[in-house]
């Protein structure tokens, strides 16, 4: 097959044509400031509220619980820093899983420098947070618990429903303002898992438009109506005072649309992605690859296994970046870890936390699919490219075959 094959959709995806069209329309016609009291403003506000309704419907939530941001990094920062600030009267501790994205780990590290106690929860060999350890360390001084829904490197689906139930059992008797905030980074989940934050007992959830075919620089924080978070950005009081700044209305409208599309396509997409994932695992294992993370895919409803769009493998004796560049020469784009850390030499904190040896962690390659942009023939063509690329590489330690 000719041309490029892009299999790095956990990093980002191209923008869906429906989103491009909606953004064009918004920029050319509905370009008012939604805070303006005249008709231009009201038109923009209507588009903004339509996007809020669409995203709320995807989350089984109320529109007033959706706050638009500049992306998931901002949403994660807002939940961690703003969640801690709202609980500083009594809170002393922050619990985060050891496999969180840096957008959660770095705000937690800042809180630690400011005197908070931060516990990084260990995970099992597939990257799943250890509930026994969480149960041990939970106490009434915990202000924020952050566990992501789908790990961006391993694809592991975390049991956030069980964590929500555990928190409800332990803290349900307290007034909402006195309970810890359960924050869930769900960036990798829309279109692959049904999102039910309220039913799971979650307090806040971070989302990002560009992972589902929307534009970059747009995201949201879903915040349960009874949960408290202090704003980080102060100014004009937009987003009901939680996030000041004139809204990116074209991006937000596109976000609402692609979120709605992703959820509408989920039931059909999940078994298809799961079959492609199975085929990739089988083909890569035939080439000597060793799977990192769960083997089975989630059915799109239950919080178990792996999300159906992420495969992570290591090839003994080879570095991930060597494999990645050899594939690039074949026109296939994959990643070594998360895009944000792919340019750093250190092995992934996620793979090390899951107990992988350093050499295996350094050898990891992530392949990630899109429900709407990936085609079946690309999966087979990618496997053929892996075969050619690996055939041309010399492995360290004579581990080649
Ligand atoms: N959280 C996870 C799990 C991610 O994969 C990403 C992607 O880079 C982010 C947060 C950051 O999202 P954004 O690019 O919208 O800031």
Image (cartoon, rainbow, N blue to C red):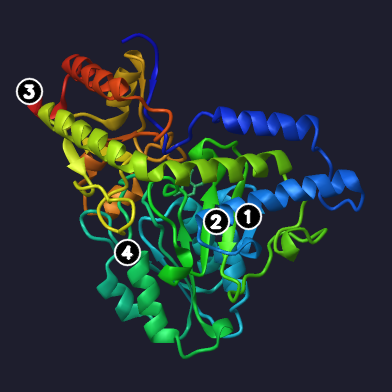
Earlier along the polypeptide chain: callout 1 or callout 4? 1
Kindly tell me whether residue 316 is visible in this rendering. no
- Please state which of the two labelled residues, at mark 4 or mark 2, is closer to the viewer: 2
The image shows residue 55 at horizontal and vertical percentages of 57, 52
Tell me: residue 363, above or below residue 171.
Answer: above
Instruction: Identify the residue shown where x is 40% and y is 62%.
Output: 147
Q: Position of residue 301 (x, y in %)?
A: 33, 56
Of tags 2 and 3, the one toward the viewer is 2
Question: Are dots 4 and 2 in contact, CB under 8 Å?
Answer: no
Contact check, label 2 and label 1, Cβ < 8 Å: yes
Mark earlier in primary sequence (4, 3): 4
Q: In the image, is 164 to the left or to the right of 313? A: right
Residue at numbered disc 1: 53
Q: Which residue is mark 2?
A: 57
- Residue name at image x 68 percent, y 62 percent: 232
Is residue 395 shown left or right of residue 218? left
Q: Quadrant of the N terminus?
A: top left
- Does label 1 or label 3 sit earlier along the sequence? 1
Q: Residue 60 vs residue 273: left or right?
A: right
Q: Please give the name of the residue rendered at 46% of the width and 44% of the height, measured from the top-left corner.
A: 264
Whole-Å distance between the Cαs marked 2 and 3?
51 Å
Marks 2/1: CA–CA distance: 6 Å
> The C terminus appears in which quarter of the rendering?
top left
Q: Quadrant of residue 140?
A: bottom left
Nearer the observer, 69 or 26: 26
Q: Which mark is residue 44?
A: none
Q: Does the image show residue 248?
A: yes
Circle 2 SS class = helix
Alpha-carbon distance for marks 4 and 2? 22 Å
Q: Is residue 380 above or below residue 366?
A: above
């Amino acid at each position: 097959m000719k041309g490029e094959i892009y299999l790095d959709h956990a990093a980002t995806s191209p923008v869906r044509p429906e989103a491009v069209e909606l953004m064009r329309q918004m920029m050319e016609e509905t370009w008012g400031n939604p805070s303006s009291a005249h008709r231009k403003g009201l038109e923009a506000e209507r588009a903004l509220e339509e996007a809020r309704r669409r995203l709320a419907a995807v989350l089984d939530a109320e529109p007033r619980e959706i706050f638009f941001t500049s992306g998931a990094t901002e949403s994660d920062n807002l939940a961690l820093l703003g969640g801690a600030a709202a609980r500083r009267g009594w809170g002393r501790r922050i619990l985060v899983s050891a496999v969180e994205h840096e957008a959660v780990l770095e705000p937690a590290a800042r809180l630690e420098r400011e005197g908070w106690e931060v516990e990084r929860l260990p995970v099992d060999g597939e990257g799943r947070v250890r509930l026994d350890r969480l149960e041990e360390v939970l106490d009434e001084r915990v202000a924020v618990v952050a566990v992501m829904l789908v790990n961006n490197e391993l694809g592991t689906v975390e049991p956030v429903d069980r964590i929500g139930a555990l928190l409800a059992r332990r803290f349900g008797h307290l007034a909402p303002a006195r309970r810890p905030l359960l924050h869930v980074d769900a960036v990798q989940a829309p279109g692959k898992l049904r999102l039910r934050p309220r039913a799971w007992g979650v307090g806040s959830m971070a989302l990002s438009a560009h992972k589902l075919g929307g534009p970059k620089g747009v995201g949201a924080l879903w915040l349960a109506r009874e949960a408290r978070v202090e704003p980080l950005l102060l100014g004009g009081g937009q987003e009901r005072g939680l996030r000041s700044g004139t809204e990116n209305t074209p991006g937000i409208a596109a976000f609402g649309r692609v979120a709605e599309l992703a959820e509408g396509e989920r039931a059909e997409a999940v078994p298809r992605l799961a079959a492609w994932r199975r085929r990739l695992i089988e083909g890569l294992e035939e080439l000597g690859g060793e799977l990192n993370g769960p083997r089975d895919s989630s059915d799109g409803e239950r919080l178990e296994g792996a999300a159906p769009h992420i495969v992570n493998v290591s090839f003994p004796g080879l570095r991930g970046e060597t494999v990645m560049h050899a594939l690039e020469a074949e026109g296939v784009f994959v990643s070594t870890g998360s895009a944000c850390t792919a340019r750093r030499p250190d092995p992934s904190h996620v793979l090390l936390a899951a107990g992988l040896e350093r050499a295996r962690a350094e050898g990891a390659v992530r392949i990630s699919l899109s429900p709407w942009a990936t085609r079946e023939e690309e999966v087979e063509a990618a496997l053929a490219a892996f075969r050619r690329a690996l055939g041309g590489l010399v492995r360290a330690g004579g581990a080649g075959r």
